[in-house]
Amino acid sequence: MSPTITKSHEYYQDQANPSPGTAIEPSASAIAQGFAQGPNPSPLPKAFQPLTIRGSTIKNRIWVSPMCTYSSEDGFATDFHLAHYSQYAMHGAGLIVVEASGVLPEGRITPNCLGIWKDEHIGNLSRIVNHAHKYGAVMGIQLGHSGRKGSTIPMHLYGTRATFHSTESEGGWPNNVYGPSPITYDDQHYTPREMTIADINAAQQAFADAAVRADQAGFDVI
């Protein structure tokens, strides 16, 4: 007979108070057992001091920068992303910033980058945010547009071909790479087309729409 986990089941880690990464003074028990010398008369190191910015209090100054993981399909966050970001929250990082997420499909660097250009992306991102919040982490997201660096291959494929080009058969968009000028980033990237005023307006609106989705997903910081 298999064990049953009820809906009210809560994990030990979920009940930790204070949450991981929160600095506390040594307890009387710890001092009695010789694990600590007593209350520290000096201030906490800056790394462990909380910081409040515009209403968001971050429990420490150990922050995770946005780092591309090239593990998405059609811009959707996956179980990998849930595990990847949750580990930082469970180990006490104060602020975690989710990797660059394309505000438009052609605004991704690679076909495997995260996206936030459609409402369907919100649910999976919200799942990550909600889980990280259980451990007291403040969650941010980097909204991005690749510009002239778009439609390239993930970094783990660098050196396997002559250029960084990602073709249409690989999910790339070689005919829809654009930037402020038709100047190539370098000889490894596609030559972009120069943006029109309509392109600029569309990109601006895409950033605004993505910010709304980020808020709906529960992110604290953009």
Image (tube, rainbow, N blue to C red):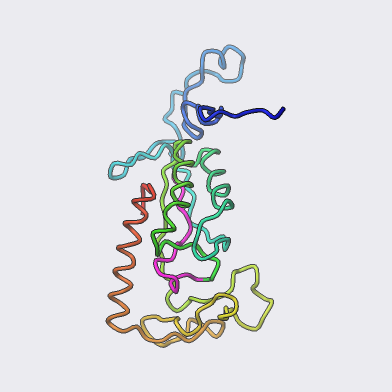
Magenta stretch bounds: 94-109
Q: Nearer the viewer, residue 167 or 163?
A: 167
Quadrant assignment, res 121 = bottom left
| Residue 202, position as x, y percentages in the image | 31, 74
Q: Is residue 140 magenta?
A: no
Q: Nearer the viewer, residue 123 or 24?
A: 123
Task: Identify the image quadrant of the C terminus.
Answer: bottom left
The residue sitting at 70% across, 30% down in the picture is 2
The residue sitting at 55% across, 64% down in the picture is 73
Task: Identify the image quadrant of the N terminus.
Answer: top right
Quadrant assignment, res 212 = bottom left
| On screen, residue 5 above or below 211 | above
| Residue 41, position as x, y percentages in the image | 44, 23
The residue sitting at 53% across, 48% down in the picture is 85
Q: Is residue 58 left or right of residue 191?
A: left
Label tally: 0
Furthest residue toward front: 1
| On screen, residue 3 above or below 146 | above
| Residue 78, position as x, y percentages in the image | 55, 54
| Residue 219, position as x, y percentages in the image | 38, 49
| On screen, residue 19 above or below 127 | above
Furthest residue toward right: 1
